[in-house]
Amino acid sequence: MVRALTSRRVVTALLAATLAACTTRTVQQAGAVTATAVGSGTDDVQNVVRLALTLDAAADRQADTLYASDAVVVGNARIRLAAPRFAGIGGAGSGRVTITAANATVASGVAWVLVDYRWISSAEQHAEVGRATVICERRGSGWKIVHAHSSQPLPWGP
């Protein structure tokens, strides 16, 4: 019971810190998407987030397996219950996502990933950009997304 309360407090504290970090710019280039969620390093957590974005863009229901049952997902200030979960991604399976930058931090079974991405519509030949903060928690032998918050730049922003 004490461990569960401590874990929730850690997640809550990290959530507050990472929501504030949504406005920062990370400049670490990301690699190819791989389908692994097992491991304890930053690469493993980044892979979970990359896979979540890629599957979301394809409207693939396999994305559901990457989220905890109690996960909270917010895109452009709206709770998202199904695909598309991330801001800027539109149309069921009608585009692809490119990760432009990602940075992950892992501490005591909790991780947070800041990611910049671009969704490219295959039907309408246009692109949307977005930024997400994703909090993951170690569950069993892998990572599960417990919170994701994404948004797009304001039209008058840089």
Image: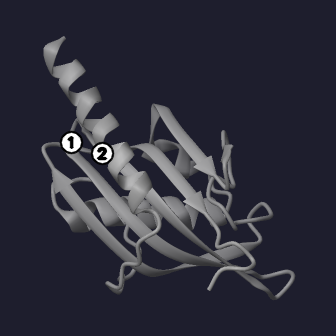
* Residue 142 x, y percent position in the rendering: 26, 46
Which element is circle 2 on? helix
Say what amino acid the circle numbered 1 marks: Ser
Can you name the residue that lies furthest to the top here?
A: 1
The residue to which callout 2 is attached is 14
Comes first in the chain, label 2 or label 1: 2
Tell me the CA gap for discs 2 and 1.
Answer: 21 Å
Return the residue nearer the eye: 42 or 112: 112
**Image depth: mark 2 or mark 1 in front:** 2
Q: Which mark is residue 141?
A: 1
- Rendered residue at 16%/61% (across/down): 41
Q: Position of residue 26 (x, y in %)?
A: 36, 78
Give the answer, above or below, for where 17 lies relative to 117.
Answer: above
Q: Residue furthest front?
A: 156
Q: Amino acid at mark 2?
A: Leu
Q: Quadrant of residue 129?
A: bottom right
